[in-house]
C-alpha cells in the first residue's frame, strides 16, 4: 500500500448503524432517568408552565397519571415538588402532614411505589412566602442552623408520607447530617439521602421558579449556592462533607454547563452520581426547537448522552418519560 494512504481508519467502526450501535460506549437506560414533577394545591386543572412547554403544575389526579406514565415507560424514579396554597415565613406547609407534598407522596407511593422510586425534594423555597430556601434572620440572611431544624422536620414528614428517598437541595452546611439524624431517630434509617452536593447559584434555574412559584422576593441564593466561578475543589469539599455526613448518592446541578464537575465526582466518589438537567437547560432546547432552529429530538438525546458520558449514573430530566419511551 502506498504511504500516502492511512493505515489507521477509525471510520471503519462508524460505517453502519449496527456497527455504531454495537461499539457505543455510552448508553442511556430508562431506569437511570428521574422525572421531576410539580404538584400544586387547590387547582382543578393542570396548569402549563409557560417557560417550560410540556411541563405542568399538576393536580393530585394529573400527578398520579404522570407518575403512572413514567412507571410504564420504565423511568427509574420521580422527584416531587409541592406548591402549597398558603406560604409563610417558616414554610409550615413543608412539614405539615396534610401539606400538598405529603398528601401527594402518600397517594403516589401507595399506587406506584413498587414500580419506581418516589422521592421528594427537601427544601423550603417552595413553602416560604419570601421564596428563600431557609429561615431568615432579622437582617434577611438565611439562618443556616435554624434552617437545619426545618429541613430535619420536613425530611421526617416526607418519609412518614412514604417518600422512599429524600433529596436536600438547599445547600445549608450540615444539612445531610441533620436530616440523617432526624430520619434515624424517627425510624427511617432505611431511607436514603440523595444530596445535592454541588449546586451552583445558576441562571439556569429561571424557569423552575415559575414552575415552583419560588422566586426569591429579594436578594438571591449566592450566599449558600456555589459560585459558578468557584474553584473545582470547593465542589469536591462539598461532596466529601456530604458523604461524611451520610449521603447515599450525590448530585451535580445544573448538568450541561458542569460536565467537568460530574466527571470529577464520578472519579472521586464511590456512590451513585446524579446530574440534574435543570429547567433552563430544558427551556433552551424547547424554545430553539419551537423556532425551528434545531433538531429537538437529536439535541435532547445528545445532551443526555453527554451528561452520561461525563459520568452521571442517574439523570434528572423533565424529558424522562418521553426519552424512556424512545429508548
Ligand atoms: C430548590 C430547588 C431549585 C431547583 C431544584 N430544587 C431551585 C433553586 O435552587 O433555586 C431547580 C431545578 C430546575 O431549575 O429545574 N428547592
Image: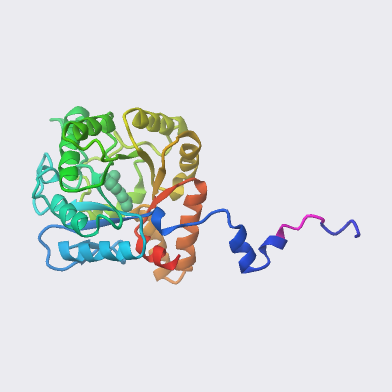
Which residue occupies the foreground of this view, 4 or 280?
A: 4
Using the rendered view, name the quadrant where residue 88 is placed: top left
Classify 323 as above or below 251: below
Q: How is the image coloured?
A: rainbow
Using the rendered view, name the quadrant where residue 122 is placed: top left
Picture coordinates of residue 283, whole percent (x, y): 36, 60
**Magenta stretch secondary structure, dominant:** loop
Q: Is residue 161 magenta?
A: no
Which residue occupies the foreground of this view, 274 or 143?
A: 274
Determine if residue 108 is in view.
yes
- Residue drawn at (11%, 50%), measured in percent from left and top? 99
Picture coordinates of residue 158, whole percent (x, y): 18, 45
Determine if residue 135 is in view.
no
Residue stretch in magenta: 7-11
Q: Is residue 8 magenta?
A: yes
- Residue drawn at (16%, 35%), measured in percent from left and top? 186
Amino acid at each position: 500500500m502506498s504511504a500516502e494512504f492511512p493505515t489507521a481508519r477509525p471510520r471503519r467502526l462508524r460505517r453502519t448503524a449496527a456497527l455504531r450501535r454495537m461499539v457505543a460506549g455510552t448508553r442511556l437506560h430508562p431506569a437511570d432517568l428521574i422525572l421531576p414533577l410539580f404538584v400544586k394545591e387547590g387547582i382543578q386543572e393542570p396548569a402549563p408552565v409557560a417557560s417550560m412547554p410540556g411541563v405542568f403544575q399538576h393536580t393530585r389526579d394529573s400527578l398520579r397519571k404522570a407518575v403512572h406514565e413514567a412507571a410504564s415507560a420504565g423511568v427509574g424514579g420521580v422527584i416531587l415538588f409541592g406548591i402549597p396554597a398558603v406560604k409563610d415565613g417558616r414554610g409550615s406547609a413543608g412539614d405539615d402532614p396534610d401539606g400538598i407534598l405529603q398528601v401527594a407522596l402518600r397517594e403516589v407511593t401507595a399506587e406506584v411505589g413498587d414500580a419506581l422510586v418516589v422521592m421528594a425534594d427537601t427544601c423550603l423555597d417552595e413553602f416560604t412566602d419570601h421564596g428563600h430556601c431557609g429561615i431568615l434572620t432579622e437582617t434577611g440572611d438565611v439562618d443556616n442552623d435554624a434552617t437545619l431544624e426545618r429541613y430535619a422536620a420536613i425530611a421526617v414528614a416526607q418519609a412518614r408520607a412514604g417518600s422512599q428517598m429524600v433529596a436536600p437541595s438547599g445547600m445549608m452546611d450540615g444539612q445531610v447530617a441533620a436530616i440523617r439524624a432526624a430520619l434515624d431517630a424517627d425510624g427511617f434509617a432505611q431511607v436514603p439521602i440523595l444530596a445535592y452536593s454541588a449546586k451552583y447559584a445558576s441562571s439556569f434555574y429561571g424557569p423552575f421558579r415559575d414552575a415552583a412559584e419560588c422566586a426569591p422576593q429579594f436578594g438571591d441564593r449566592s450566599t449558600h449556592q456555589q459560585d459558578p466561578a468557584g474553584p473545582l475543589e470547593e465542589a469536591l469539599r462539598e461532596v466529601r462533607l456530604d458523604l461524611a455526613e451520610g449521603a447515599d448518592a450525590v448530585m451535580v446541578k445544573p448538568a450541561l454547563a458542569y460536565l467537568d464537575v460530574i466527571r470529577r465526582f464520578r472519579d472521586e466518589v464511590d456512590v451513585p452520581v446524579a446530574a440534574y438537567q435543570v429547567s433552563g437547560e430544558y427551556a433552551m432546547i424547547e424554545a430553539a426547537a419551537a423556532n425551528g432552529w434545531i433538531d429537538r429530538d437529536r439535541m435532547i438525546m445528545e445532551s443526555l448522552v453527554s451528561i452520561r458520558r461525563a459520568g452521571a449514573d442517574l439523570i434528572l430530566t423533565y424529558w424522562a418519560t418521553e426519552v424512556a419511551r424512545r429508548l
